[in-house]
Image (cartoon, rainbow, N blue to C red):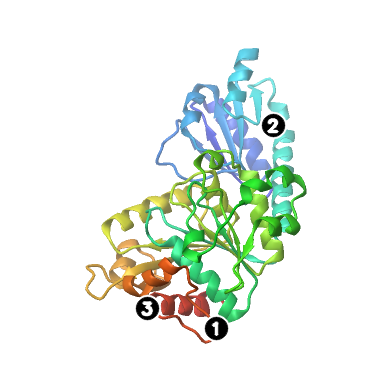
Amino acid sequence: MSSSYKSLILSKRKDVIESVRNELVEGGVEVVTQEEWKPSFSETFQFYFVDSDELDALQAITVPTSSFVIGLTDDRSFDEGRRWVKAGAYDVLVFPDEMDRLGQLIMEVQQSLELTEQSFNRDSGNGVVHAFYSAKGGSGTTLLSILTAQSLRIHHHKRVMLIDLNAQFGGVEPALGLEFSRSYYDLQPVLQELSLHHIENISIKDERTGIDVLPGPANPAKAEEINEELISKVIRTCRAHYDYVILDLPSAISTISFTGLTESTAIHYILTPDSLGLRAFKNAMDLFERFQLSGRNHPVSLLLNRTHPKGELAEKDIARLLSKEVTASVRSDYFGLQPVLNMGEPFYKKKNDRGQSKATKDMKLFVDKVLM
């Protein structure tokens, strides 16, 4: 068993902890024990061994879909088994009678985890996925994702797919001056055989810039029907055929935004230099660490948006308060951006064009120095 796997044993019983710990350690799994669930305990594990006394606490644990919950109980009854199934357990062990199954069960989970990792590597393709996200609404994720997509295409001749994951109401199409009649919601009937051909039937090419755009349904009722599998397969299919996939994510953490963050190869957090923005960032980073969304596989960069010389918080202040370096700063320029947005015109029109506003010049510099 790979030592990279971690396990949480949630139990007050010393005999249970000792028996399970010995089997896990023998298999090379790192073990953490807790007598009861603590909301502040934010680490994520591949294995969750939960004693029946803590079954109710399982409702408070947000277990990632890639992790496995294994119940530990003294009760062989059908009702007990059903309780665990409803709680989302992968399997249930009757202690101590079925402890001889534990070794085989660990091996099964290991094989499943390895197959998942192999599937991701096989299906991901050679492209890179850049997610633009902010926990605070109105921070400028849509605008900066559009600027990034246009710069990659116009200045560097990359094949770019821009995916609007704001599924409830959208936002990309008016900013680009485009009209959409279909969305990735319409790909659900062909999900099992999804290919580039299906993506091309739904997406629309912005002929002025050359980027491809995949819109969301802009319908709250339809957004509720979109699941993790659809978003994941759409992103992976695009990644296999494009140099860059740019995700414009909604602020709320939902199935759509969480899957987009999970599938990304880089996350760009958009921060406005104000108290609300700082608080939202700190809360978001706690969540990112809990679900292992930041780190080697999902590096998180910090983009400071709408900076101004007269602002109370400068870039160095932000870096000090958050203990994190700012990757790039984008200057505030409402009057330089708004006319272009209102007309739905491209921000860049040719290779040497840096745009007409301070923000477009700053984002071109970000793309040139950070993404290339």
Which mark, by number, is residue 102? Answer: 2
Point out the image quarter for the C terminus.
bottom right
Residue 248 percent across, percent down from the top left: 51, 58
Question: In terms of secondary structure, where does tag 2 sit?
Answer: helix
Quarter holding residue 359: bottom left
When asked about the image quadrant of residue 156, the answer is: bottom right
Q: Identity of the amino acid at label 2?
A: Leu
Nearer the camera: disc 1 or disc 3: 1
Decide which of 8, 79 is in the foreground and name it: 79
Q: Which residue is mark 3?
A: 358
Q: Are marks 2 and 3 in contact (CB under 8 Å)?
A: no
Residue nearer the viewer, 142 or 102:
142
Q: Circle 3 — which element?
A: helix
Question: Gap in Å between the C-alphas at discs 2 and 3?
Answer: 61 Å
**In the rendered image, the vertical position of residue 193 relative to residue 105, given as above or below:** below
Secondary structure of residue under mark 1: loop
Q: Which residue is mark 1?
A: 350
Of labels 2 and 3, earlier in sequence is 2
**What's under tag 1, amino acid-wise?**
Lys
Q: Earlier in the sequence, mark 2 or mark 1?
A: 2
Residue in the image at 56% along x and 48% along y: 217
Q: CA distance from mark 1 to mark 3?
A: 17 Å
